[in-house]
Every structure is written in C-alpha cells, then in structure tokens.
Image: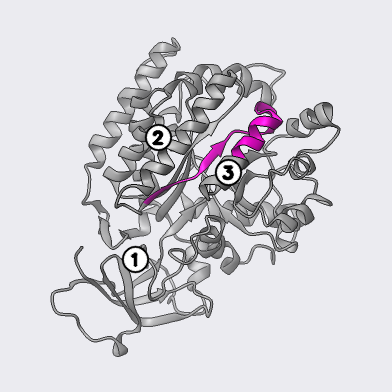
Amino acid sequence: MEKLLIKHALVVTMDAEDRIFRDGTIYVEDNLIKEIGPGSTIADKPGAKIIDASDKIVFPGMVSCHNHLYSAVVRSIPYSGFESPDFSFVSWMDRFWLPLLEDRVDQNIMYAGTAANVADHIRSGITTTTDTAEGSYALPGALDAVDKACIETGIRAVLSFETTGRISEENAAMGLQENVNFIKKCRARDLDRITGRIGVHTTYTCSTELLQEVRKTADELDVGYMMHHLDDRYHHFDTCRRFGKRPTRYLEDIGFLSPNLILFHCSYIDQWKDPEIFKRNDVKVAHNAESNAIFSFWPDMIHLMQAGVTIGLGTDGQTFNYFEVMRTAQMIHRIKYENPELFKDDQVLRMATIEAAKVLQMEDQIGSLEVGKKADVLVLNDRSTVPIFETNVKNYIVNTCERADVNTVIIDGEVILQEGEFVKFDEKEVQEKSKEEAVRLWEVNDWPLP
C-alpha cells in the first residue's frame, strides 16, 4: 500500500474534540492515518505520494447504515405498479415489488447492480456501506456475487442477506445459512475491508421462532444483526393482531433486541414508549430520510434522539446522493416541527460519519479522521461564493455541497477516485453491465423496452 501525504487542506476531523485544521496535513501509511494536524507540525515523508488539497476540504469518508445495493438495476423501471387506486405500501410490496422484482433477482443482477450502486455511492462520498441483499431465489451464493462487486470496486462494506420466512421454512433456513457461511468466509480471509452481519426482513414476514433463531445465531457467532422495522403502519396492525402487542414491545418480549441490533427506518414507532425501549436495549437505528420521503413516509427521529439512541443515516439502495440525504433529514424534521434549530449541521454530519460508525460498532476504525483509524478520506472541492473556514465549513458541506464536489476518495488507504475519475475500475463498463441486466429483468416482466 502506497504512502499518502494530503497537504494544504481545510481538515474537518469530526473527532471528539471537533478539531478543524487550516492548512492541515494527513499522513497515511499501511491503510492507517499515522499523523494529522496543522501542516507546520508534520514533516514531509520521503516516498509518499502527495495529494495537494489546496482550496479543498478534507473530511471523513461517509457511512451508510442501510442499503440494498443490487437495486441500482431496478431504478427508473418502465412500470411502477402504482396504478391501483387502492394503493398502500404493503399491498404494493406484496403485489409488485416481491413477485416482480425481488423474487426475480439472480446472482448476475446482484453483481451488476451492486457494482453500479457502489460507484454512485463512492461518487457521493460514501466509503462504507451496509447492505441487506435481497433475492430469495438467488440462494445459495447470493452474497458471493455482492462480495465480488464490492471487492472489485474498493468500497468498505458490511454485507448481509435478507433472511425471510415469507416463502417457506426451507428458504428461511437457506437465508440464515447464507449469512453464516459468509461471515465465516470473511473471518477466514485476509481482507477486513468487507465484513458480515446477519440480515432478516421484518416482523410481518418472519415467525417468532425465526427471529429468535436469528438472535441466537448472532450471539453464537458474536456478530451483529439487522432488520427492517416499522417502515409502514401495517407492522403495527400485524403484530397487534397476532400477538396483542406493538412491534417494538413484541421484539423486546421475545428477546430479539440487543446492542448488536440495527433497526432500519423506524418511521412509525410508538413515539411515547418505543424510544425508552430502544435505549434500554441499546438498539441502533438507520434513518433513511430520502428513501422514506419518496415513499410518502415521514420518519421522526426526534424522540429517539432525546432518549439518547444511536442513529446513523442510510441510503436504502435506490437513493445514493448523501448530500441530498443529509438535507432531507434536516428539512423533514424542521418542517414537521416548524423549528429551524432542529437537526443542526454538526448533528447531521455526525449522523453521516461518526454516529453512523457507532451504529455499525466500528467507531474505533472509521467515522472520523484520527491517528490509528482507517484511512477513509474525502477531498471536497470548495466552490463557495464566500470564504470557507472553521466557523461555516459544516454549513457549507450540508447546505451547498453536491456529489459533483467529491474530488478524491480514499478507502483503506487506497485512492479509488482521483480528481473525479475512478482509478480502480471502468465506471462506464459497470454502468453498461447494469443496463444489460435491467433490460433482461424488464423482458421477463414483459415491460416496455427501449
């Protein structure tokens, strides 16, 4: 791994002391940050590749806590399934998404979609992503396809397969085993950039016994696990009908909740009771503001924040512009409560970096620029119409930056994107492969073709 010396930057560390350095320097060696501080305090390093970051902002690589990477292939499909006047999210899932998309995903689609989505994520400043691969008929080996794409593109990733009980007990067992096999595979190889967790779908597609088996397996492997939770009001109706309990209380009562659990979305929690339950069990939350808003959900994280629950941002697959995600998270809460002081810039940035790293239990490795941490680094262009310095740089990143401003991306000490160009893979080739797989899916569903 080459040595890197990033010089003359406005360095925003996002560390516990919230240090910001003008004319700052970062020295990277063996994929780790070895030195960071004002340029005057760090000597030149013989043999190091110099990245001149004059008039640029250097910032930690951002972290997405939830994703479905394959879904690059199902963006902008020529049929939406929304025509029914009796539309609801759960009926759309049951009548459209699951049978026509998720159940027709194969390993070729998973590989091509993942590679294309990762390229978009890296261009958006995301250096770590958390994936829940869907495709119950792509088993076994679905995660191998996702893994291959992640290795080739250079992203740091936490991968899982979405175990579900909606098809059969046999398929549920295959899904859980897919996670177990992949976790063991990751642990047996010399590549810590990609790790595994156990993924599971949600309360209304999984039996109590399956959820308890997921928790038991995660404990035995000493690994994290993650699940969709309350992204639709139907979750309440389902568990209340079956068990006489709302979903969060039900999950606590069956012993599913723990500090190793990430719950995605949480748009329709019981705002008066659930935050205390989350905090009591130290459950982590992935807040997917833009994705939820697109589907007409209005997630509210305020009560969870007040309870001290750890919350990070996520993309949820079809969205990938993290600057848009940060702004959406900020705006929906300010509009709902008519309070422009909510979701301050620093708070939103932390949810995209160090708080997101805490959600993944990886805060000792990523999420901030500090000596000893992995060298996951963004270099952002400064195209501001006003001077950018310590006081206003966070406001600039949240309110003005776009993905086009991501100049250079370093992941694990390796330059992946340099001055706007990928150096590890051919972006156009990745996009063309995704298009081919998308058309193949459209043909199967007899949708309009180009």
Vertical comparison of 49 with 272: above or below: below
* Disc nearest the viewer among 2 and 1: 2
Residue type at mark 2?
Leu
Instruction: Name the residue carrying label 1.
Output: 375
Dividing the picture into quadrants, the one containing residue 240 is top right
Dividing the picture into quadrants, the one containing residue 184 is top left
Between 450 and 277, the one lying in front of the other is 277
Q: Residues within 10 Å of mark 1 (few under 14, many from 20)?
A: many
Q: Earlier in the sequence, mark 3 or mark 1?
A: 3
Residue type at mark 3?
Met
Q: Residue at x 26, y 67 (%)?
A: 30
Cα–Cα span, label 2 and label 1 = 26 Å
Q: Which residues are magenta?
A: 194-214
Checking the image for residue 226, the label placed there is 3
Residue type at mark 1?
Ala
In the image, taking residue 280 as reference, residue 332 lies left or right, namely: left
Question: Label 1's element?
Answer: loop
- Give the quarter of the figure containing the N terminus: bottom left
Vertical comparison of 20 with 264: above or below: below
Q: Residue at x 83, y 51 (%)?
A: 273
